Image (cartoon, helix red, strand yellow):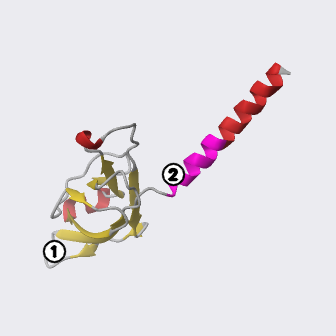
Amino acid sequence: MYSYIIQLFNKVFLISVLVFGVVNAAKAHDLMPTYFALDRTYSDNIYMVELTTWNNRIDIEYYELEVMDEDWKNIPFATVQNIFKVPYQTRKSLKVFIRKSDKARVMYICTLSKVIKEKVTRTVIASRVCSKIKR
């Protein structure tokens, strides 16, 4: 009887963890469009992409922008702010500029949530959300 109660408790615990994880995943931030294209700018040597991020995490307000290749290695890029603030339940438009010489290597543009140490009162999970280039 005792082992049956423990097995039942373990199953209930596992199901609640799975459900809680799915609900929390829906509360993460977002990056649109999911698949982006690099557009030419006024200069032949610079390409640009416009993205929008949405913050649905009450515990996070700052995000960092990253540009990666297919092996998840960083690629140099330019933007107005590499780390930027997006208050809870708001959107922010982003412009990312990439050199022509790096255009063929670009695979992902990501936003990474940044935790401010002074505000941490419990364990906080950082999240990375990425958009992939349309080829």
* Residue 135 visible in the displayed image: no
Which residue occupies 27% across, 43% down? 119
Circle 2 packing at 10 Å, graded few (<14), some (14-19), many (20+), is: few
Identify the disc placed on residue 24: 2
Which residue occupies 29% across, 45% down? 115
Q: Quadrant of the N terminus?
A: top right
User: Which image quarter: residue 86?
Assistant: bottom left
Residue 28 appears left or right of 116: right
For this rendering, which residue is in front, 123 or 32?
123
Magenta-highlighted residues: 16-26
Q: Quadrant of the C terminus?
A: bottom left
Residue 62: where, in percent of width, then height? 27, 54
Say which of marks 2 and 1 sits in front.
2
**Helix, strand or loop at disc 2?**
helix
| Kind of residue at disc 2 | Asn
Residue lying furthest bottom: 42
Residue 15 drawn above or below residue 132: above
Identify the disc placed on residue 44: 1
